Amino acid sequence: MLLGGISLVRAAPLAAPAVLAITEFPVPRGSGPHDVAPAIDGGVWYTAQRSGELGWLNPATGETRHVALGRAGERSAPHGVVVGPDGAPWITDFGANALVRFDPSSESFEVLPHAAPGANVRQLLWRPGEVWGLPRARTAWSSSRPASYRASVISRPVRADS
């Protein structure tokens, strides 16, 4: 959950479900956190949309780390993040028009360019063996198979009355 675009917050039930404790975690100024996903190590991955980075937060200590997504001369604009079955975060990147997988152990990136120019995929969903996204125009679904790095665009049916 994001608060004011400059912090990450955590809400956890205390004694009764109606009582919540909110903890706010500061993040680097100008990072513009957007989406969050739980990391397998107990941390939290988040997209730092304004700074073009992938962020990681340790909720026990408040420590954050950022890794730049774009290469020299490229503008990165990460939006969505999900964690795949192997524990690696997958990020949607508007600037690169791609899905990006980050390997936390080697701190390396794998970029899977989107098949449609300007697709601007925002959110991702895992299904066994596939990652699905909805491009901004909402005229097609995007499907990627990470094992083969094959991406495809599937036309979305349009209702006659829309």
Image: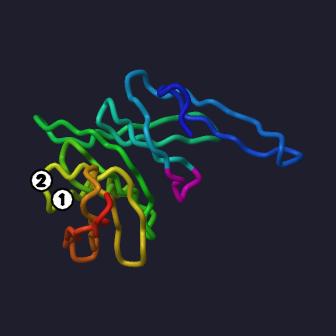
Which quadrant is home to the C terminus? bottom left
Q: CA distance from mark 1 to mark 2?
A: 7 Å
Residue 117, placed above or below residue 6:
below
As rendered, which of 30 and 72 lies closer to the eye? 30
As rendered, which of 127 and 148 lies closer to the eye? 127
Instruction: Give the amino acid type for the residue marked by disc 1 in the picture.
Output: His
Dividing the picture into quadrants, the one containing residue 49 is top left
Residue 86, placed above or below residue 43:
below
**Segment tinted magenta in the rendering:** 37-42
Q: Residues within 10 Å of mark 2 (few under 14, many from 20)?
A: few
Instruction: Give the amino acid type for the residue marked by disc 2 in the picture.
Output: Pro
Q: Quick check: 20 left or right of 43?
A: right
Horizontal and vertical percent position of residue 88 = 40, 60
Q: Quick check: 88 left or right of 62?
A: left
What residue do we see at 19% from left, 70% from top? 152
Dividing the picture into quadrants, the one containing residue 100 is bottom left
Q: Quick check: 10 left or right of 87?
A: right
- Numbered circles on residues, count: 2
Secondary structure beneath disc 1?
Answer: loop
As rendered, which of 69 and 134 lies closer to the eye? 134
Secondary structure beneath disc 2?
Answer: loop
Horizontal and vertical percent position of residue 138 = 29, 56
Residue with the most extreme top position: 29
Q: Which residue is mark 2?
A: 117
What residue do we see at 48% from left, 35% from top? 64
Q: Which residue is mark 1?
A: 114
Where residue 34 is drawn, which disc sits there? none
